[in-house]
Image (cartoon, rainbow, N blue to C red):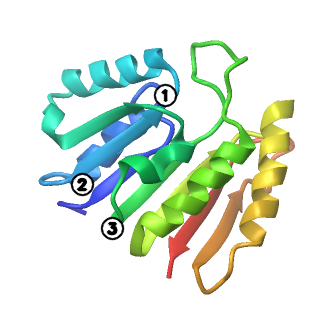
Amino acid sequence: MPGDRAVDCTAGNGHDTLFLLKQTAPGGFVHAFDIQASAIEKTRKRLEKAGIPPSCYNLIQDCHSHIAEHVQPGIAACMFNLGYLPGASHEITTEPYTVMKALDSAIDLLKSQGIITVVMYPGHEAGRHEMELLLEFVRSIDEKRCRVMHLLNVNTAKISPSILVLQKL
């Protein structure tokens, strides 16, 4: 919604950061995290090309598990797009334990009815392991704290991404 604050916990190439900025304009603000300098630079270039003023965002080269150190409570939305940076080394991937810590903190930072989305990619071994651990983690979240939904494609033989949606109550 216009004027809201949001967080992209995995900036990558900047697509989700730009999406969040468009959703929160005018008057909104987006924090975007990535551990890779190249991802931060790609995101910066994408936002500059789209004409987004730097006063509307904060690009943070840090692990998303440190979200609480950089972001104030009251955010409306938070996005995670797990795995590796497209077009970069597949050796650098998100780690399930940092994602769990970031998710736990992000829930605390959400305003009531705020949403977190997590896109998981179980098509490779690290992604499959990450998804298993994250599903176990979200099943343990108190249902009075937030609602958790798992969306997945059920009519294909191919292993496809699935999405977690968390809504703070």
Placement of 29 over or under 52, stated as above or below: below
Say which element carries label 3.
Answer: loop
Residue 65: tell me if it is visible.
yes
Q: Label 3 to label 2, Cα distance in Å?
A: 14 Å
- Using the image as rendered, state which of residue 77 and residue 142 is in the foreground: 142
Q: Label 1 sits on what residue type?
A: Gly
Where does label 3 land, which residue?
A: 74
**Which residue corresponds to the image point at 37% horizontal and 47% vertical from the top-left?**
70
Where does label 2 land, which residue?
A: 24
Taking the image as shown, residue 33 lies to the left or right of residue 148, namely left
Placement of 141 over or under 12, stated as above or below: below
Q: First in sequence: mark 3 or mark 2? A: 2
Estimate how packed mark 1 is, as few (under 14), some (14 to 19) or many (20 or more) residues with alpha carbons within 10 Å.
many
Q: First in sequence: mark 1 or mark 2? A: 1
| Residue 12: image tag | 1
Q: Residue furthest bottom?
A: 144
**Which residue corresponds to the image point at 62% horizontal and 47% vertical from the top-left?**
119
Determine whether label 3 and label 2 are within 8 Å by CB.
Answer: no
- Which marked residue is nearer to the observer: mark 3 or mark 2? 3
- Using the image as rendered, state which of residue 45 and residue 60 is in the foreground: 60
Taking the image as shown, residue 118 lies to the left or right of residue 69, namely right
Say which element carries label 2.
Answer: helix
Q: Label 1 to label 3, Cα distance in Å?
A: 24 Å
Q: First in sequence: mark 1 or mark 3? A: 1
**Viewport quadrant of the N terminus:** bottom left
| Residue 119: image tag | none
Taking the image as shown, residue 112 lies to the left or right of residue 50, namely right
Residue 158: tell me if it is visible.
no
Q: Position of residue 164 (x, y in %)?
A: 64, 59
